[in-house]
Amino acid sequence: MPNKKVLPPQTTLWGRITRYQIIIPLIALLLLVLVNLIADPTFFKITMKPNSNGDNILSGNIISIIDNGSELAILALGMTLVTAASGGQDISVGAGIAISGSVLLRVINGGDPRSETMQNPIILGILIACLVSMAFGAFNGALVAFLKIQPMVATLILFTAGRNIASWINNGELPIVKDESFGYFGNYIPGVPIPTPFIIAIICFIVMFLVMKFTTLGLYVQSVGINDKTSRLNGLNPELIKLMTYVILGLCVAIAGLIKVSRISTINYSVIAKDIEMDAILAVALGGNALSGGKFSLASSVLGAYVIQFLTTTLYKFEVKATALPAYKAVVVILLVVMSSPAVKEKFARLSKKFHKNEAAAGKA
Amino acid sequence: MQKDSLLEMRGIYKSFPGVKALQNVDFTLRKGEIHALMGENGAGKSTLIKVLTGVYPKDEGEISLEGKGTINIHSPQEAQNNGISTVYQEISLCPNLSVAENIFIARGKGKFVSWRSMNKKAQQLLDSLGIGVRATQQLASCSIAVQQMVAIARAVDMECSVLILDEPTSSLDESEVAKLFKLMRELKDRGVGIIFVTHFLDQVYEVCDRITVLRDGQLVGEYEIENLPRVQLVSKMLGKELDDMADIKGDVKPFVDKSGTPVYEGKGLCSTEGISPFDFEIHKGEVNGFTGLLGSGRSECVRTIFGADKVTSGQVKMDGKDVKISKPRDAMKQSIAYLPEDRKRDGIVGDLSVRDNIILALQVKTGFFKPFSKAKATEFANEYIKLLDIKTASVNTPIKSLSGGNQQKVILARWLLTNPKYLILDEPTRGIDIGTKTDIQKLVLKLASEGMSVTFISSETDEMLRTCSRLLVMRDGKMVGELTGDQLTQSAVMNTIAGGEKNAE
């Protein structure tokens, strides 16, 4: 009679690795790094040189990736929570950035689009922009949580109307902030060689990490996302928690909006943060989070966001035309998403198991 | 293959990471017999069925079918093509389609559909099997029992020779079970071989011809029903002589002290779920229960007490003080715990680990800004895994991969961890094996002796008679009687449920 040997759970190398969700964006990142290393090792060169203001700043492709990926990474934080709790995505974040950016400019310039000086302190503008953006987040959240509308449909409202609202806030004008200090948020603070957006992003990650550590938000969001009936019977308020995730995303949107507007010290309502919602959703997916909600990993989503930016920069490096960029991106996305799909993962796990079995058998013989 | 056998499985092996689910299991099904597959949770019944239906690939062994010789089944579709049909515990039909559509779905070969002839054929089939439902009715509008029978009708119409019923009766009431049995006997007369998986011993002895018993993934034996008395069946399933089912109450003193202030006292309680206002009280250390037929409102009553449904009226006192309970959070603040009837829908958080599932309620009680450290949570979880003997690979295992009985224990652990004054258990023993059932009953009595008040609901009356010192009888959403002391007998309960005189017998 054959005596079956039983494998303890997840003993294979693959099994041990794939238990960590972050492995998916990590592999993607390594691949991109590898491609660039082979194609052109100077891709990774970072130099210190003076910019137009005469300040010494870091420059290079890597710096440009961590700089330009910041808005996406910040959005990915909020989008991950929204996805986990409500099992759907907010597609109005691009329009939301237009709104909060518009509010910010209006407050700072005090309603005069060509104002020579700032009429209100920047911090007041940021605060009001955050509040407005969180209010819009609460509107989306209320539609999803209380009226039980599918998240994509609920946020379609602001997706459609958001940029017009943004334009209306400034009466259709495009305000320009002349004060240099406003540009610090999207560029460099004099004397600091690291791009400010990256610093802001790091602060956001730390705050989010602390929130996760010192509150039970993570457990509640996952619990509500997986089974809201059970959550209610365990004393949670699923509606409130869903609403809360949308408000948090609203805050993320306002911060991303600040960076975006600060980069150019003005706004273009129809172009600003265009299609960023799709990249934000992609970052969540790339991070291995189920788009149907439930368990999540914020770190994986953030890494996913930077992988997307890495990809964009790499493609530019290969001199892909801007118009052709989305097509190339799509191909890579297909590959990444297929590789991280449950079916393919299972297949790999099985192959690896077989391999280990054969190895063990060979070892015995 | 033996002459009269329909299906033979020989030397089946199947293991999962960390578990030997099946080891050298044989199973034989003969023509026109109802064959019970018995065993505790985790004995390997479900795995054997899933191997047979191609859900899991087997590691080793042979499956042969009458007239087809040895076959390899790789998918449920392939099993179906070979005449093996399954009706699962949880209904796997599409509730938003009509009955007829459900019977014929995925069976056309890319042909056009004639709705009229489909409905007609479906109606004939339903009539011939004596299932009282219109073919055009939406499935979701039928009772669970009818849905189950529709699933069987679908299987029958696909000319199955082997029909597997995986705990079909766990959500049915008695009259529905009787209907199902009638259908099963009719199929048996047509020569269909039926594999019947159930936890209910009565039902096995009512319809089955033969019993195969599994334990810990191994075959214990195959028996003719006449040659295996109940006591022996139970002892074979458990692997030991077991008499404590009968005298479980022997070592516990019946509850008498009713003089003090009730732990919980509700007056004129009512919810939106169609029950009449009722009064209810429970004392310290008392075990009482709601009984009644399925749908009589017994679950709705306890849901009202816990605030699980929308409460419309009533005054509540805890230890004599007025409190307001309108949502589960309020009840939890008053140290009330509630283990819901529908484990999958209301109980577990499937993808979360056993640890997170155990700490959930206490964490919510403790507060948003005071999360437990991972070490603390693991400590809590391990304590209860040991205390309740929960079988899980680790605290990190997702609860959904545990067996039903162990899931139930995890949820029980979740509530015990909150150290409740008043514990409500709605069908804690449904769909779980006898060993665990006894464990839970014993635990209830132990908790009560330590001063906890417990309300216990079960659809098995003798289970309630063994544990409760007071029974509240429900009928059609109304509380129609209260039985205590000498009145606690099967016949008194039946009489009250049926609407006889209160003091009958």
Image: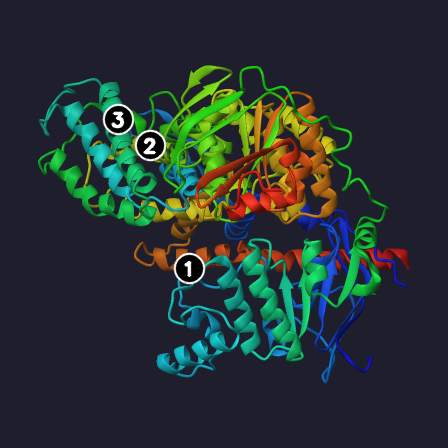
Is A244 positioned to the left or the right of A41 in the image?
Answer: left
Give the class, few, some or many, for how many residues have Cα within 10 Å of label 3's Cα (few <14, many ≥20): some
Give the SS element for disc 3.
Answer: helix
CB contact under 8 Å: marks 2 and 1: no
Is B367 positioned to the left or the right of A51 in the image?
Answer: right
Q: Disc 1: which chain?
A: B
Q: Measured along the vertical axis of the image, is residue B310 above or below residue A30?
A: above
Is A292 positioned to the left or the right of B336 in the image?
Answer: left
Which residue carries the number 3 mark? A131
Give the class, few, some or many, for how many residues have Cα within 10 Å of label 2's Cα (few <14, many ≥20): many
Res. B116 image quadrant? bottom left
Which residue carries the number 2 mark? A247
The quadrant of the rendering that contains the C terminus of chain B is top right
Q: Measured along the vertical axis of the image, is residue B459 above or below residue B440?
A: below
- Mark 2 or mark 1, which is nearer to you? 1
Marks 3 and 2, how far apart in space? 10 Å
Q: Which mark is residue B140?
A: 1
Residue A233 visible in the current orientation:
yes
Residue at the location (24% across, 33% down)?
A100
Q: Amino acid at mark 2?
A: Val
Q: Amino acid at mark 1?
A: Ala
Marks 3 and 1, how far apart in space? 45 Å
- Mark 3 or mark 1, which is nearer to you? 1
Q: Measured along the vertical axis of the image, is residue B172 above or below residue B299?
A: below
Give the SS element for disc 1.
Answer: helix
Q: Position of residue A245 (x, y in %)?
A: 38, 34
Q: Position of residue A322 (x, y in %)?
A: 31, 54
Can marks 3 and 1 be said to lie on one chain? no
Q: Measured along the vertical axis of the image, is residue A70 above or below residue B152?
A: above
Depth check, front residue: A182 or B15: B15
Q: Amino acid at mark 3?
A: Leu
